[in-house]
Amino acid sequence: MDIKQENIGDHQTVINNESGTVNIHQGKQYVDLASEDNLHVYKEISQAEQGKFIKGFIIACLIPAISLIADLMQIQPALNLPIWTYLIVFAAIFMTVAAAFFDNFKIMSSKPFGENECRQLYADRLFKRTENGYVIYTHTDECIYPGCCGKIVISDPPERYNGNYSFFGKCSLAGKQHSYGIDYNFKTYPIEVDWRPIPRPSK
């Protein structure tokens, strides 16, 4: 892809990447989100709490399933209801439990990883294992696009993967217009990101 370089105004620099070109002030080529001032902890989940959730989740799903099978064997012939009505009831119970403990559910369903290895949970929420369990947190800082007073917010990655970055961010005010690529050390660079969703095949 051909990229045109343009320096506009005084004390400007250009960041080139495979996604496009962004003009920013020379003194602010990137933001370090890893500092303590930019850290916001949402919650901490101990190993014991996560273990209780997993057991409770299994019980919450298993008992209704057993009851459902038993009821189907006894009352299905009498009520003659379609099977999907029972599936809806079971799905409602499952979704209620998952919504009430969404963070725990996402951690439970995540792939195994090492202690202090950072992963994205969802949206702006990151998480990592600690000696005692898990910590859910995020990083944020001032948007460095000229004249903007918004905040850098970590977001779900674009469907059209855009560069060799670990995470991506948007501005809390300008949204996708002020986009960022974030490396694993949380150095955050302004880039152009293709946020368009990948077209789904029509049925």
Image (cartoon, helix red, strand yellow):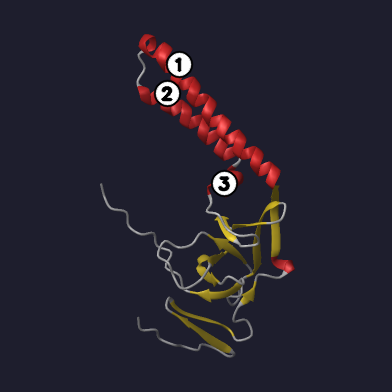
Q: Quadrant of residue 104?
A: top right
Q: Between disc 2 and disc 1, whose residue precedes?
A: 1
Residue placed most toward the observer, 144 or 67: 67
Distance from Cα at disc 3 to Cα at disc 1: 30 Å
Q: Between disc 3 and disc 1, whose residue precedes?
A: 1
Q: Which residue is mark 1?
A: 71
Q: Between disc 2 and disc 3, whose residue precedes?
A: 2
Three-letter code, disc 3 = Met
The answer to whether residue 40 of the structure is visible from this angle is yes
Distance from Cα at disc 2 to Cα at disc 3: 26 Å
Q: Which residue is mark 2?
A: 86
Crowding around mark 1 (Cα neighbors within 10 Å: few <14, some 14 to 19, many 20+) is few
Three-letter code, disc 2 = Tyr
Three-letter code, disc 1 = Asp
Q: Which residue is mark 3?
A: 108
**Left of 133 or right of it: where is 107?**
left
Residue located at (54% from left, 75% from top): 190
Residue located at (56% from left, 72% from top): 183
**Left of 153 or right of it: where is 201?**
left
Mark 2 and mark 1 residues within 8 Å of each other at the beta carbon: yes
Give the foreground label among 2 and 1: 1
Residue 203 location (% of width, % of height): 25, 46
Residue located at (35% from left, 80% from top): 1
Residue placed most toward the observer, 113 or 31: 113
Residue 134 location (% of width, % of height): 67, 52
Identify the secondary structure beneath mark 2.
helix
Residue 144 location (% of width, % of height): 61, 75
